[in-house]
Image (spheres, rainbow, N blue to C red):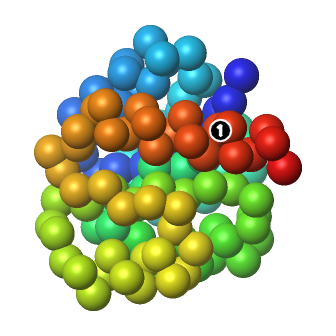
Amino acid sequence: MEKILVVDDEVEVTELLEEFLVQSGYQVATANSKKSAQAKIGEFQPGIILLDIKLPDGDGVQFLKEIKASYPNIEIIMITGMADREIALEAIKSGAADYICKPIDLAYLANSVFTKVVTRFSE
């Protein structure tokens, strides 16, 4: 079973995504800060991370770069409340597998996550 870590400062968002992803058959952990996410990455060992651009204790794109440097095989899907082309491009260039704006289209998210799972298992 694929493990997904949802990192967002909005508790409502993490709860919604956790419920949706668990119902979709994934094992899910959540974090509401960079510090909490750092601890969970090591202990939970996710294959996919849904990572918010804005965190209370750090920049999501910078955190993306840190994660990819230490865990290059983790697929990271960025999520954000602001549609910003420059940030999206920086995130993709930094290794993000996808970039999804809030409110999150759950059908798109499901497809994006499923695509990453299939890709990981076919390598």
Q: Badge 1 is on which residue?
A: 117
Question: Residue 19 lies in what quarter of the image?
Answer: top left
Q: Could you tell me which residue is drawn at 62 percent across and 55 percent down?
A: 75
Residue 21 in view here: yes
Image quarter (top left, top right, bottom left or bottom right) of the N terminus: top right
In the rendering, at what x and y percent does residue 5 appear? 54, 42
Seen in the image, is 92 located left or right of residue 84?
right
64 w.r.t. 44: above or below? below
Is residue 40 visible from the viewing direction of this image?
no
The answer to whether residue 49 is left or right of residue 33 is right
| Residue at x 68%, y 38% (from the top left corner) | 118
Dot 1 falls on a residue whose secondary structure is: helix
State the count of labels.
1
Q: For the residue marked with disc 1, what is the amino acid?
A: Val
Q: Quadrant of residue 31?
A: top left
Q: Which residue: 47% across, 75% down?
A: 92
Depth check, front residue: 117 or 11: 117
User: Which residue shows up at 60% across the image and 45% down it?
Assistant: 116
Residue 106 percent across, percent down from the top left: 29, 32
Above or below residue 80? Residue 12 is above
Q: Residues within 10 Å of mark 1 (few under 14, many from 20)?
A: some
Classify residue 55 as left or right of residue 82: right
Relative image position of residue 113 (x, y in whole percent): 51, 40
Question: In the figure, 90 relative to 103: above or below?
Answer: below
Which residue is at the front of the view, 95 or 112? 112
